[in-house]
């Protein structure tokens, strides 16, 4: 049992951090926060537009700030973006302020889940499978390093995965404070 004030989801695009995260937060009575959504609300621009105007570096700076603010509170389930683990400072903070769950998915299933998605700037272009493979090679070791727990979503529908993960968490995590956000 590893106590921490927040529950954090990491993992690649299409792993289900946003969709499964929402359901899991409801089940566990945590306030759901999606880092990408938070950035969009603060900026008044979509993730895609931020990449267009400020480049990936600009987006990463906004991501760092959003995560620091979300992690300062407690009682939250925080869905990160797939690239949040690229910054070692983010990883230190995720671990200090969260119980970190790595949602896993294979590249083939990722590509299927994201087949109709046009909102992810790192997946623009035709060579999606290759891009996903490259990102997986670069990031898998980072997810493994930061995670307290890995959960494989392959072959599970979103609701099914949320239910199974909720059960698993009962024996792995308890919040250090009563559920409900503080900041
Ligand atoms: N376990 C799952 N089974 C089937 N589809 C899924 C699953 N998890 C996510 N999806 C679908 O994949 C797409 C991306 O999911 P999302 O939650 O945005 O992933 P992430 O936030 O990790 O990038 C959505 O259309 C979602 O419905
Ligand atoms: O993998 C990445 O670098 C990114 C993943 C996206 O979030 P999801 O993982 O929720 O799709 C979003 O933060 C941005 O498009 C960059
Ligand atoms: Mg997401």
Image (tube, rainbow, N blue to C red):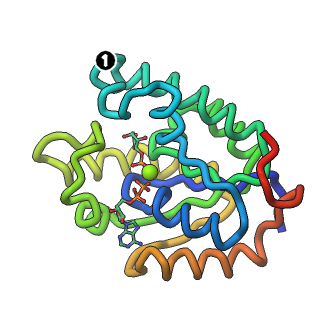
Q: Which residue is drawn at 72% across and 46% down?
A: 95
Left or right of residue 39: residue 76: right
> What quarter of the picture does the C terminus occupy?
top right
Left or right of residue 176: residue 26: left
In which of the image's four quarters is ligand 1 placed? Answer: bottom left
Q: Position of residue 72 (x, y in %)?
A: 76, 36
Q: In this view of the protein, which residue sits in the foreground, 50 or 14?
A: 50
**Total numbered labels:** 1
Q: Look at the picture and state if 68 lies above or below 164.
A: above
Quarter occupied by residue 106 = bottom left
> What quarter of the picture does the N terminus occupy?
bottom right
Q: Is mark 1 on a helix, strand or loop?
A: helix
Q: Which residue is drawn at 65% across and 76% down?
A: 166
- Residue position marked by numbered label 1 in the rendering: 53
Q: Where is residue 59 in the image (x, y as percent from the top left)?
A: 43, 26
Q: Residue at x 49, y 58 (%)?
A: 17
Left or right of residue 4: residue 66: left
Q: Residue at x 62, y 36 (%)?
A: 67
Q: Where is residue 132 in the image (x, y as percent from the top left)?
A: 28, 51
Find out if the beta carbon at label 1 lies less than 8 Å from the nearest ligand 2 atom: no
**Residue at the right extreme, as displayed:** 177
Q: In this view of the protein, which residue sits in the foreground, 30 or 100?
A: 30
10 Å neighbourhood of mark 1: few (<14), some, or many (≥20)? Answer: few
**Residue at the left extreme, as displayed:** 126
Q: Look at the picture and state if 119 lies above or below 16.
A: above
């Amino acid at each position: 049992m590893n106590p921490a004030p927040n529950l954090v989801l990491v993992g690649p695009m299409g792993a289900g951090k946003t969709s499964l995260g929402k359901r899991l937060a409801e089940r566990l009575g945590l306030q759901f926060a999606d880092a990408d959504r938070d950035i969009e609300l603060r900026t008044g621009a979509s993730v895609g537009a931020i990449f267009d105007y400020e480049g990936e570096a600009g987006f990463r700076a906004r991501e760092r700030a959003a995560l620091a603010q979300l992690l300062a509170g407690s009682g939250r389930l925080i869905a990160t973006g797939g690239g949040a683990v690229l910054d070692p400072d983010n990883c230190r903070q995720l671990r200090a302020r969260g119980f970190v769950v790595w949602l896993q998915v294979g590249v083939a299933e990722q590509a299927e889940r994201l087949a109709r998605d046009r909102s992810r700037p790192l997946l623009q272009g035709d060579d999606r499978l290759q891009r996903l493979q490259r990102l997986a090679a670069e990031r898998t070791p980072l997810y493994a390093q930061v995670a307290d727990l890995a959960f494989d979503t392959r072959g599970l529908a979103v609701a099914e995965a949320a239910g199974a993960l909720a059960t698993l968490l009962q024996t792995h995590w308890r919040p250090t404070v009563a559920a409900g956000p503080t900041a």
